[in-house]
Image (tube, helix red, strand yellow):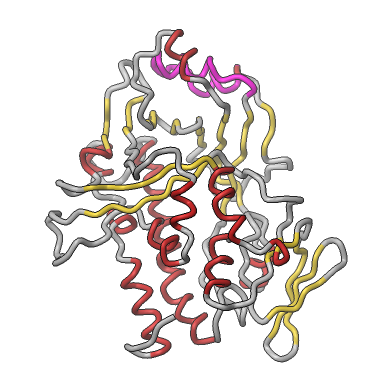
Amino acid sequence: MAASAIGLVKAGIHVEVFEQAPKFEQVGAGVNIGEAYAPNCLLPVLTPTPTGPNALLPLEQLGVLEAVLAQADEPRLTMRPFRFISGFAAHDIIYDVNSFIFCYPATPDDVGLAMPTFLEALVPMLDPRLIHFNKRCVSVASSPYNSHTLHFADGTFYEADVIVGADGIKSVVRDFVSGVSVPPAFSNSVLYRAVVPIEPLKAAGIKTDITRPLCWVGANKLNIGVFSREPNVPIGSVDVQSPWAQNAFQEEMLNDYSGWGEDAIILLKSMKDVSKWYLHFLHPLLDSYVRQRVVLVGDAAVLQAYDKIRVLRANTVHKMSTMAGDIYEGRGTGGGTIRDQLEGIWEPIWHHDLKEEVKRAVASVYGRKGYL
């Protein structure tokens, strides 16, 4: 949201940012953003074309990329590809993203940032007078003359021409857009989370190379953090009481991973002060992201152009992520090995020509010579 606000200000649009928290602070461990170029890839392209993760391009277009890269912990963009390995026995390598996800020869680039560092890069680019903290939105209402009013928990309100909502999993803005209350559904997945230093793992005798990002997979289990899922329970049938993040006992986690291989158990036993997160998501998916002038800057035609391209892509990513999770956990329906089913699965996302899609959306509103 901060990046979007900065981009709008750079475009000469007045923006007010309302933040529920008392200050900008870390949410999550970090962010990995990237873009890859494959000039010699055997794809129907004539010039070097973005064919990898698309996150760098929007940051560049919004005018914030240089500030983000200045905070990076490495002097150049470096790809950090995942390896998928079996959670059992000898932890055999199932799939190496570095070897298969990109056409070769390629020069994939990305950058990893701790979340506080990412915020440190963006926040100074916003005028502090435009930022309002301790503003928890409780409702959105239509107002005369095509404007809308945000109502906050402290009794204040703000009237705006356009509202861009990014208010989290319990979104009030989403309820306005959908026209009904859409409570998040429990995904039947939990995440056990802890910070584990590398040196104690080595001292405990772990043999797996942990200097590269890796994902241990097994039946109904996915280990990035430590995920555990109940696939046979209907989505939304279990009502999890708040809070959705709780302290967890290590014994509970070890029981969930009973039978896993030696290195996986070493990692689990090294996890202290474990938290357990009950993961929720939107279910079912929305048919539209726009209602009246809520979601994106622009007149009604621009909002419709956004809705036309964004809903399909976002819902596709959601469905493909679910499909990938099933493959990781041994429930893929495509046949063949996990590696066979994973190969090429991210291409519609990573190889998507984002710039061309934006160009088509602009042309649909302003004509072929139009621009934003």
Asked whether the viewer can see residue 221, the reply is no
| Residue 67 image point, x, y percent | 49, 54
| Figure label count | 0
Q: Quadrant of residue 292?
A: bottom right
| Residue 304 image point, x, y percent | 49, 81
Residue, x 37% and y 50% (percent of image)? Answer: 34
Residue, x 38% and y 23% (percent of image)? Answer: 210
Q: Can you say which quadrant of the picture contains the N terminus?
A: bottom right
Residue 255 falls inside the magenta stretch: yes
Is 23 located above or below residue 206 in the figure?
below
| Residue 167 image point, x, y percent | 65, 59
Is 35 located above or below residue 162 in the figure?
above
Q: Can you say which quadrant of the picture contains the C terminus?
A: bottom left
Q: Is residue 155 left or right of residue 9?
A: right
Q: Which residues are magenta?
A: 251-273
Asked whether the viewer can see residue 261, the reply is yes
Could you say which is closer to the camera, residue 77 or residue 139? 77
Residue 205 falls inside the magenta stretch: no
